[in-house]
Amino acid sequence: MKKLKNLLHNYINSPLDPYTNMELGLEYEKIGQGAAALSFFLRTAELTYEDNPKLAYCCIIKNWKQLNNTTRRPNEEKSQLETAIAFLPKRPEAYYHLSTLYSKEKLWKKAYMHSCLGLEFTNVTSLPYDVYYPGDYMLLFQKALSSWYLGQRKESAKLWQKLSGMSDVSQYHMKIIQQNMVYLNVKPLLK
Amino acid sequence: MINNLSKIVINNGGSITPLLIPSTLTDGTGLCNVSVFIDDNGEILANIRHVHYTLYHSEFNQRFYCGWGTLAYLNPEDDICLKTGNYLCKLDPDTLEVISHQKIDTSKHDTPPVWTFIGLEDVRVFRWDGILYVCGVRRDTKPDGEGRMELCKVDWKSNSITEVTRDRIEPPGDHTYLEKNWMPILDMPYHFVRWANPLEIVKVHPESLSSEIVISKDNKIKLPLSLRGSSQVIPFGEDRICITHEVDFFHHPGYYKDAFYYHRFIIWDKDWNLKSLSKPFSFMSTQIEFNTGLALKDDNFIITYGYQDNAAYALKMPVNLLDKLEWEDVNQSIEKVTWHEPLIYSKTDYNNFKFKFKGLKNILQNYSQCYQDLFVLYILKGKKKGTYLEIGAGKPFYGNNTALLKEFNWSGISLEINQSLIDQWLIERPNDIILNEDATNVDFNKIYNNNLPKSIDYLQLDIDPSSNTYKALKNVPFDQIQFNVITYEHDYYVDNSKYRLKSREFLKEKNYILIASNISPDNHSPFEDWYVHKNYYNNSISNNDQGVLCAKDYVFKS
């Protein structure tokens, strides 16, 4: 509470400073108060979209996350991610999140499409705040998963194989990748 | 205008505290509109409204509005209802943090809702005759959403809070659609301030579910917006004090509805004479804020409010800070009312509207007091990118004559002498030119950088009193600028002054044709004349006999 109060003081003294808005949004997010977090992220985005577009982009994705945590707002979740894409279409993060949303709805063609689109824009500069993006490999993961459900078995197998040889994959995802390879009888890449 | 009361408070010995209910109970959706009350044993009670939505409100240039617009209630998509629940809490006496909370169990009196706003909204908490009450508006019991104040006894046990009674109070007088924001008077059991300007106090009779007017004042303070209820009315020395709110609604170009909320302190003496009225303020420099609680503890006010329906705060404000606020000159402000609520055109009026022009079909709602903006656009055939000179700008949207023109990409200069209105313009119409100038002696050459335009599409003249409007008229460089349409406010019904005649003679000499005279919002308040340049004269709409011309009769088919 002490930190929240301090950040609130900063905000009150400079309500048009995007960074005081951002810090307050982050603190509200940390304690699960998604609605309050959304208010301050949205203000930050509106205050920075010209001068610091990467920060504004982070905020839109963070707003998606607040709605995602709340659940039961699937259309507005997608709308937020589409807003992010429309704003900075050459970044991969929002494509990835859209792809995962479509996966959960078993809309595999859309999940596949958004993973492919995201893969067009990998290896970009980092963002100032975490937007729940594990790394570019997850777009490949999404593509492998959705292509399997679309019947593109060979493509899927190749992608799992490629993923198994990547060094930046998290332990959690690597376990899934290896499991899938066992199911599909895919051999690891020779090192 | 006091933009950011919290800043004054925290930098002058006060404090602010976020009020939180764990997100495990709320899914992180909105907490707002808190009401605070000091109980008989000194405990600080608070009712926090929990809404099952997240308010998405984009501010400033509004680059990132969502699919529903700039102001949207993001409720669960499988449930279109906007649901409210209420948590009664105890606050720490020093820090004001929530130390215990319990949702009010309303199941004893709940019936299946028949409208989409569900639950008791904007509750005020208080005790009358030793009984703990919550009182708010409920709109879920009638299929048309009719709203009534409901007064509910609550029983607070150690592990539960239960609504014991629920009395739905009918208002006095004629039937109304929506009654809300009645302010309970804490030292007068069963009395509420129903209206603050002019003051109307009602006494409620829970046993008969009725109410009666017991005090009704006829002196109204001249303000640009209606005062609506916010906090409870609490004793304050020999006087009583409360906080009111006002809402400035507007539409963004094309479609979306939006609003600014402002609040004020108001102090009455023991006989309910108005003593003091603060300038409007925002709590934290945002558009949507709402106060429902005020309490006095030792030398501090505790003021509780919601921020964009998404967050709740308690402000501890030293009482002596009242002296640091800006206050209206109440004696100056109380006068014969010269303001009538705007007669608003909305899209559903299209078929009956006489003065059709290109683009009218797309207008959802106008802003002027008596359709001036639509008249201007009619005369100029729905012109895009027109120009205006607005003398006496007033509010940026409410009752304003150029706000709609901006939706047609007009540009121009607005003059306003009232600094608090200028401050509102800077927030609400930041891209428009508004100058703090005295129009009775301003140098227009200077304003236009020695480059006066040869013609301007629309000239508005409206500054009080009528003598000043006439002075401003005489100061306009008519010999150098031709205006195509002029609306001139003479306020004849207020003072029967000579300035109406003088202005008519003056403008006739300048070759302007009086096309609609004595425009009135009703049948007995002639306040304005409308002129056109001879190039735009249209005999078929001319109506300049000397009688009162009711604006509605003029612009709508009979």
Image (cartoon, coloured by chain):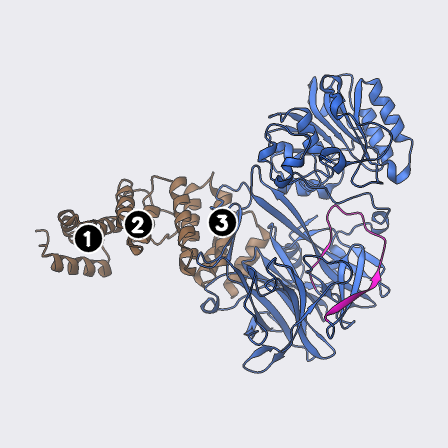
Q: Residues within 10 Å of mark 3 (few under 14, many from 20)?
A: many
* Residue at the spot of label 1: A167
Q: Chain of mark 3?
A: A
Magenta segment includes B256: no
Question: Could you give the CA–CA distance between mark 2 and mark 3, rounded to whole angstroms?
Answer: 23 Å
Which chain does brown denote in the image? Answer: A
Q: Earlier in the sequence, mark 1 or mark 3?
A: 3
Depth-wise, is mark 1 or mark 2 nearer the camera?
A: 2
User: Chain B appears what colour?
Assistant: blue
Q: Chain of mark 2?
A: A
Type of amino acid at the residue the image marks with label 3: Leu
Residue type at mark 1 is: Ser
Disc 1 element: loop
Residue A34 on image: x %, y %:
46, 59
Other residues around mark 1 within 10 Å, as few (<14) / some (14–19) / many (≥20): few
- Which residue in the protein does label 2 denote? A99
Q: What segment carries the magenta color?
A: B209-231
* Residue B100 seen: no
Residue B419 drawn at (x, y percent): 73, 41
**Magenta highlight: main SS:** loop
- Above-or-below relation of B276 to B511: below
Circle 3 residue: A42
Answer yes or no: do the residues labelled 2 and 3 have beta carbons within 8 Å?
Answer: no
> Does the image show residue A170?
yes
SS category of the residue bearing label 2:
helix
Q: Position of residue B352 (x, y in %)?
A: 67, 36
Which badge, 1 or 2, comes first in the chain's sequence?
2
Quarter occupied by residue B111: bottom right
The quadrant of the image that shows the C terminus of chain B is top right
